[in-house]
Amino acid sequence: MANWTLIGLLALCHTCLVAGYTKFPAGFTFGIATAAHQIEGAWNVSGKSENVWDRLSHTRPELIADGTNGDIACDSYHRYQEDVDELAYIGVDFYRFSLSWARILPTGRVDHVNPDGIRYYNDLLNALAEKNIEPLVTLFHWDLPQTLQDLGGWANPKMIDYFRDYSDLCFREFGDKIKSWITFNEPYEICEDAYGDIKKAPAIDSHGVGNYLCSDNLLKAHAEAYHLYNETYRPVQNGRIMISINSIWYEPADPNNAELVALAEVANQFKFGWFAHPIFTAEGGYPTAMVENVALQSAAEGLPKSRLEQFDDYWIQRIKGTSDFLGINHYTTFLITGAGVDPTAKDPSWLKDIGAVQTMEVGGDSASEWLRVVPTGFANLLRWCKSSYNDPPIYITENGFSDLPGTLEDYGRISYFNEYLSEILNVIYDDGVKVLGYTAWTLMDNFEWRAGFSERFGFYYVDITDPARPRTPKLSVEYFKQLIANRELPQDEIFKDPAKIRDEL
Ligand code: NOJ
């Protein structure tokens, strides 16, 4: 009897949750994101040079789950008008896409500008303008020209100048049409996964060393691009510029265990704080927990200096405050289960430096091992950002769900969006978190980096065996279209109740 009462109460409670806030505040905007290397293809066409992902997928195909590459991808280089038509059909306010550095500057430096690269992005921008879709443009979404990687890539301090010069060119060439810029997409993935591991190109695997060299250079490069825009371009172009930081939100496995609570905080400082603390806090610089932990580990390794050096005063001031908004890419939550060295940690490494053991055993599944469905983790992350970073205005610059190729009735994706969006409404209305816009990942199934095409995040299914790369809408297209048309979580029975959708899965 007691059990039934409990189940009844839980059901009631669940209904309350589902029937909670549904309407988005006035002015809230919706968009969809992609990235150049994941969709464009045309990898060696019209003057584009090789980037680090071309090099990795061509020379080490065994590192890509299905042995594929981005040579053709969704062929958006030739089919961008189809992309724009799909975006217009869904009714988005903005389209987030990235510029291919190697397409615009084949040497990586400004000694030679590729006119075809400039033409391609102007064509895309004009097509968007015709449909009244605002561009939100990322300068760097992981596809570094191989020429610059040959000089050390993000481990080389000279990258600060190269990125500034590239940004300068982009602001000058496209700034009349682009009013919203993102400098870097997911700096954690760039530094930790690509220089501290082999999870991303260029797969340098200098764990515990290269990752921290990268963050030094990347944060300085970001700050230089921001100041350049702020001082030279903003006064005439009137735009805004930010960085998109990714999070795996860490929760303590037992919220009543003070040690785990403290360790989860350290883990969040290592993950999100690594790039957010220098930019969004009043004191600036890397988070104290990070500086202290890496110093202790380095000393234990017998090193004369820490592997992570705090910025000097000049750079602390120069980096602080260099983002008009906090851009957040969020997908998932992991649990912290204890103190010590995570069994998967290399020595030395960022993961070992944290000093906590983590697990992904939480929430529902997706097609990606790392992506667990934990909507409440999103709300906790957003509340934490509000309190840790002085209540910043926030754009969600990515959020999305993967399933297997060919899933056209993508209830898992709809349910994910519905539950995560519902948590956004909760934190806006209950906690006053200033979330101003939401970007879904992604327009169409595309090259999911080392997962190749084996995991699909798109609103449109893309048949990559067909040279015409036909795009077929999934059910989530109608969900998102209805959401944007009404600025409200869709009320159709088929979309409304995540629990019901789960039962149908
Ligand atoms: C974040 C990255 O920015 C994007 O490129 C990637 O495809 C999605 N996450 C999904 O993994």
Image: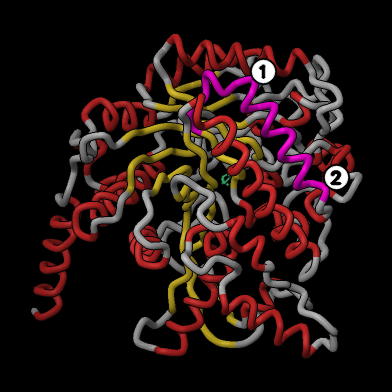
Looking at the image, can residue 457 be seen? yes
Q: Name the main secondary structure of what is drawn in magenta.
A: helix
Tag 2 near tag 1, CB within 8 Å: no
| Crowd class of label 1 (few under 14; some 14 to 19; many from 20; radius 10 Å) | some
Magenta stretch holds residue 159? yes
The quarter of the rendering in which ligand 1 is drawn is top right
Q: Earlier in the sequence, mark 2 or mark 1?
A: 1
| Crowd class of label 2 (few under 14; some 14 to 19; many from 20; radius 10 Å) | some
What range is drawn magenta here? 158-180
Looking at the image, can residue 460 be seen? no
Work out whether 357 lies above or below 128: below
> Which residue was labeled with disc 2?
149
The residue nearer to you, when weighing 444 against 30, is 30
- Dot in front, 2 or 1: 2
Residue 97: x and y, percent?
56, 30
The residue nearer to you, when weighing 96 against 167, is 167
On residue 236, the disc is none
Residue 16: x and y, percent?
13, 57
> Which residue was labeled with disc 1?
77
Which residue is at a point 42% across and 45% down the rendered structure image? 396
Per the image, label 1 sits on a secondary structure element best described as helix
Which residue is at a point 65% across and 82% down the rendered structure image? 293
Per the image, label 2 sits on a secondary structure element best described as helix
The residue nearer to you, when weighing 376 against 103, is 103
Query: Left of 258 or right of it: where is 504?
Result: left
